[in-house]
Image (cartoon, grey):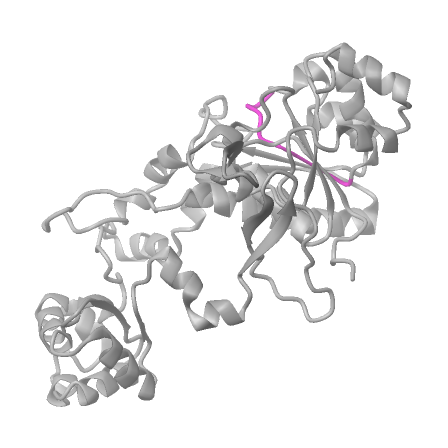
Amino acid sequence: MAGPLAGVKVLDLSRVLAGPWAGQLLADLGADVIKVERPGAGDDTRGWGPPYLKDKDGNETGEAGYYLSANRGKRSIAIDISKPEGQAVIHKLARRADVLLENYKVGGLKKYGLDYESLKAECPGLVYCSVTGFGQTGPYSDRAGYDFMIQAMGGLMSITGERDDKPGGGPQKVGVAVSDLTTGLYGVIGILAALRHRDQTGEGQHIDMALLDVTLGLLGNQNMNWFIGDVVPKRQGNAHANIVPYQDFATSDGHIILAAGNDRQFKAFCEVAGDPALAENPRFATNRSRVENRDALVPLVAALIAKKTTAEWIAILEDVAVPCGPINTIPQAFADPQVVSRGLAFELDHPLSGKVPQVACPIKFSGTPITYEKAPPLLGQHSDEILAELGFNAEEIGALKSGGAIG
C-alpha cells in the first residue's frame, strides 16, 4: 500500500544530518526522494566512523553507521554541480520535483543558478526548504552552524548537565545531535504545510529553517520560566525544574526514574514506601511546596528508595499507577518487550552486507501504513536509473560520466 506522500517527488541536496533526516522522514511517508551527492566522496557522513557496516564476508565497507541512520528510502545520484552539465541535470530534476531540500551556506547555490529565486521562475510550485545554522537573515547568517555549537548558543547546554555544586557539574550537550534532528522534524512540518498551501493555490514557497531558531523553540517551559519568573533557569541534573520528585534515584541494586507528576501520585508513592505521613507534611503536600522545599524532600525520598531493588520498585509503583522506569542502555531499550512488540528494529536488504539494521519511523498510520523497501543507497547507486527517467539515453549518460558531471 502506498504511503500518504506517494507521488510527491523530493530533490535532496542536503548533507550530514538535519536535511537528510528530513529527507528520510519524507521517504518513510512515501515520497520519492532523490539524494544528490558529490561524485567520489558523497555525503560527509559516509566516512564518519567507525563503526562501518560489514559486508557479507565480515569486512568493513565504506558505509558508516552515521550515514546509515539518516538515508533510508532514498535513491542516490552523484552529480558535480560545479559543472554546467551537472547543473543542467539538477534543473531537470527540480522541474519534476515538488520539494527541494538543501543545507548549503546562505547564497552558496546562487552561483550555480540553484537558489530559490533562480528556480522559482521555472518551478513556481516548488517548495524549497533551506536548512542552515542561523537562517537566511540576521548578522550571523553567513556563519556555519554545527549542532554542538548551536546547543551551546541556544541555551540548551545551560540547562543540561549536573548542578554546578555537585561532582560532574557543568554544561553538557545532549547525547545525540538534537538540534539537527529536531530541525529536520520541523522542516518536514513546514514542507507538509507548504505543500498543502501549494495544492490549494499552485504557489510554492521558500522555507527558512535555522538550527538556532529551533533550539530556542525547544526550550519550552524553561523559556516561560525565564519570561515570567525572571529567574535564569539552571542545570538540575536529572531533576525537573517544575515538578518534584521527578528524577533518578539510587535503588539497592541500581537506579530508577520516579516521575510523580501530581499530588495523588506522590501520595501513592509515600504510602507504598511506608511513609504516608510524608505526603501530609505541609512542606510536601502540594507540588508547589515540594518544588519550594526540594532540597529537604529529595534526601528523604532517596532514603526510602534505597531500601528496595529496581525491579521491586517498578512492580510496586506500577501497581499504584505511579510513573517509573529503569535507566536502560540502548541494547536494553531495544530488548524491552514493549519496544519489541512495536517493531521498532528491523532490517532491509543491502547490496554489500545482505542486511542492514534500521530503526522504524515512530509514526503509525491506520490507513496508509509505512512500508520500507530501500536501504540507505550506495553512492551513485541510482544514477543511471534516474537519468533514464529524465530522458537521457545510454550515449548521453556515458558522455555525462566521461565528462565528470555524473559519478
Residue 74, magenta (yes or no)? no
* Principal secondary structure, stretch drawn in magenta: loop
In percent of width and height, residue 263 lies at 27, 82
Residue 157, x across and y down, in percent: 29, 43
Quadrant where the N terminus lies?
Answer: bottom right
Magenta range is 98-107
* Residue closer to the observer: 262 or 94: 94
Residue 338, relative to residue 191: is it above or below?
below
Residue at x 39% of width, y 58% of height? 331
Residue 104 on the magenta segment: yes
Q: Nearer the viewer, residue 119 or 173?
A: 173
Seen as rendered, the residue at the extreme front is 57
Q: Where does residue 43 sit, x and y in percent of width and height?
A: 57, 29
- At a point 36% along the width and 58% down the height, the residue shown is 221
| Quadrant in which residue 377 is drawn | top right
Q: Is residue 292 above or below residue 222?
A: below
Please state the total of marks drawn on the protein image: 0
Of residues 305 and 112, the one drawn nearer to the viewer in this rendering: 305
88 relative to 314 in the view: left or right = right
Which quadrant of the rendered structure holds the C terminus? top right
Q: Is residue 133 left or right of residue 219?
A: right
Residue lying furthest top in this view? 403
